[in-house]
Amino acid sequence: MSIAEKFVSMEYGPAPEDSKEAVAWLERRGYRFQHFIAGEWKPPLAGTYFDTLDPSNGEKLAAVAQGSAGDVDAAVKAARAASAGWRALTPHARARYLYAIARLIQKHSRLLAVLETMDNGKPIRESRDIDIPLVGRHFYYHAGWAQILEQEFPEYVPCGVVGQIIPWNFPLLMLAWKIAPALATGNTVVLKPAEFTPLTALAFAGICEEAGLPAGVVNIVTGDGSTGEALVNHPDVDKIAFTGSTEVGRAIRAATAKSHKRLSLELGGKSPFIVFEDADLDSTVEGLVDGIWFNQGQVCCAGSRLLMQESIAEVLIAKIQDRMSTLRIGAPLDKAIDIGAIVAKVQLDRIHKLVDQGVADGATCWQPQVTLPSRGFYYPPTLLSNVHPTSIVAQQEIFGPVLAAMTFRTPTEAVELANNTAYGLAACVWSESINVALHVAAQIKAGVVWVNCTNLFDASCGFGGYRESGFGREGGREGLFEYMEPAWFKNAPMLGTDPSTMERRASSPVNDNDDDEENDEESGRGRPALHQQANTPHIDSPAIDRTVKLYIGGKQARPDSGYSFEVHSTDGRLLGEAPLGNRKDIRNAVEAARKAASWAKATAHNRAQVLYYCAENLSLRRDEIARRLAAVVGEKQAVAEVDLSIERIFSYAAWADKFDGGVHNPPFRNVAIAMNEAIGTVGIICPREAPLLGFLSLVMPALAMGNTVIAVPSEAYPLIASDLYQLFDTSDLPGGAVNIVTGYISQLLKPLAEHDDVDALWCFSDEPSAAAAKAMSIGNLKQVWTNEGRAIDWFDSKVAEGRWFLEHAIQVKNIWVPYGE
């Protein structure tokens, strides 16, 4: 045999990683692990343990404590007791702790990598070279944020006690994604690792001990789904951060709806891997290997849907099959292995079932000729071609090494296929034309898009999804917002509990005597615009001859119900009648909003110009609108509302082309372009207490960022809708960008919350309405933002306008673009 022939025929020999240090670590702990609570190892109150297995052979690794509601309660109490002290530390002190943890992760990196592979089944090369270095990177990166947090976020405070639930596919990396930003922002943590993979979380608890982290700052409670449920339901937890399946995410959304818990969800995905005919196909195939066969395909952002341009499909499939034939499958501690073990038999059975169903739906299954190990849980790399876009394998997350292939002809069709899913976590675009790649990337509904690369992650770059892939971001500056709140909001009183709240002002006309003005000034809640109106003309009572309609698609529309309801002044006079909107009116408004695509596509400059026009036109009608509004809120508040409304519209016109994204600088030859994108169609329940100002304070930031809106105006004075749609009609706002449906919140909230084409819901009303908005929105897991029933002083620009509102009007898409040769 010639040398060339020998070179081609050579195979990798075994290169096993030595596991003796990991085994010794298990032995020192007696193969039995307790909870880590208040800086101590504590046995489970119920005395129950469960086994964690090595997926490569099915053998027991250790017994782990099964957490009960009592164990969770003890951990939450420990976190609460440590909260004030941790928050009171100087930024530098918190930064030093995170830095110390990062150093210890590096010190113990080999042990952690081997433990991760033994517990999870992923190849040691992935644990050693990808997962563990990224874990350290997250703590280093967030140590920096801890140091400068007060300078960069001076008016924000930590949520408090954070409950975190992580999955089994990246056990230690997911822990780092959650614990590092939580600690950096001053929170304390109770973390529940996945039942299948608890070992590295318990090793991390030992690192916290070694770093001298104050007792109770990090608590680790192990267990199954019931343990997680107890953590979600605990009344003294301020925030839940969850990564896992969409089904469980829905359950958590429902369970937390009636509480004030903050919630972030990173859920499932069915990510498209789009290949254009001008792509470098050899590089594409290597990217595809990382995209779908990395970690046995057990990746939420796995490129599991291959979308190929028709002209290259045959050639690409042949290259993929050739490459699949070279993938090595076997014991994951072997450094020459590409594909390790599936995490558990239940997951292996699910993969078999879904692939069988895909074949039954008409897909063609191809697998390389490989011999799987006789013990453990293994599944070969699989290619399903001729997949129909509606097939189960094109729509459901398989979470295994299975690729579903489809074709497209044009970039438009590629985008339609890419977005033909309920998910929106990640995507890949491969093309040698950067124009094509970025044009397509901008249209894909996903939180992360990789251009000519795949599965790149860094602590500096946000990660998270759109639609049923969840909401919130992890990593980067944007990820810090998940663990903080504006200080004023966290301490705001509930509506109706503070005599100085706007609800009290709205329920009775503002008294014009000097004593009230003096009291306003003394309390620091004066109205500068109001006090400057020394020559305000007398405001007469309105006439009752106005016919108000709904405003849908840029046109006045009669309500489907055919009914209206009376609107009275504070002294009982009939002011007019407002249309009684219903479910069909909401449906029509949503349809109109979805059709108003031109607004989202307009340049930020053009959106700003339209908002400036709105402000100008409101200025021209100032006295007229104030006269009508006065019958409900009093003369002083009416004038103040109109004047501040003009100012607020100007503010958001100014923000429209200035609330930019950023360019992250990960430690690779990539830039990650963080684009602030409109969420889409936003339903807004406006506050009762400031009919004009409250409406515009919510609708304007949504419009400024390119969203379309369905707004339900104040029940106290829905007749303001007439003035508003006349304002929009004369300001060049495209039809459907804003739709106004009047009626009772109790009747309109449900169809808005349940509508699958509404991408976000803002509800600024009482506490029961806020809870209902969250509970009824679980269908498509739309983003929900509420005032939690708290009073907001809409007249105070420091709290009622600005970045906090704009942050909720956008979602961040990170587009990774490589550079260099």
Image: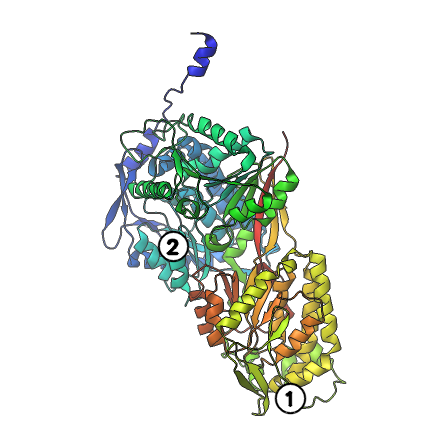
* Mark 2: secondary structure: helix
Q: Nearer the viewer, mark 2 or mark 1?
A: 1
Badge 2, how many Cα within 10 Å: few under 14, some, many 20+?
A: few
User: Where's the C terminus, which quadrant?
Assistant: top right
Q: Nearer the viewer, residue 660 or 182?
A: 660
Please state which amino acid type lies under the numbered disc 1. Asp
User: Could you tell whether 357 is left or right of 699 in the image?
Assistant: left
Pick whichever of labels 2 and 1 is earlier in the sequence: 2
User: Could you tell whether 529 is left or right of 317 in the image?
Assistant: right
Above or below 642: residue 326: above
Residue drawn at (41%, 26%), measured in percent from left and top? 325
Residue 517 visible, this angle: no
The residue that label 1 is drawn on is 545
Furthest toward the left, the residue is: 47
Q: Quadrant of residue 370?
A: top left
Badge 1, how many Cα within 10 Å: few under 14, some, many 20+?
A: few
Residue drawn at (71%, 62%), measured in percent from left and top? 608
User: Could you tell whether 135 is left or right of 655 in the image?
Assistant: left
How has the structure been colored for display?
Answer: rainbow
Furthest toward the right, the residue is: 535
The residue that label 2 is drawn on is 247
The CA span between labels 2 and 1 is: 52 Å
Furthest toward the top, the residue is: 1
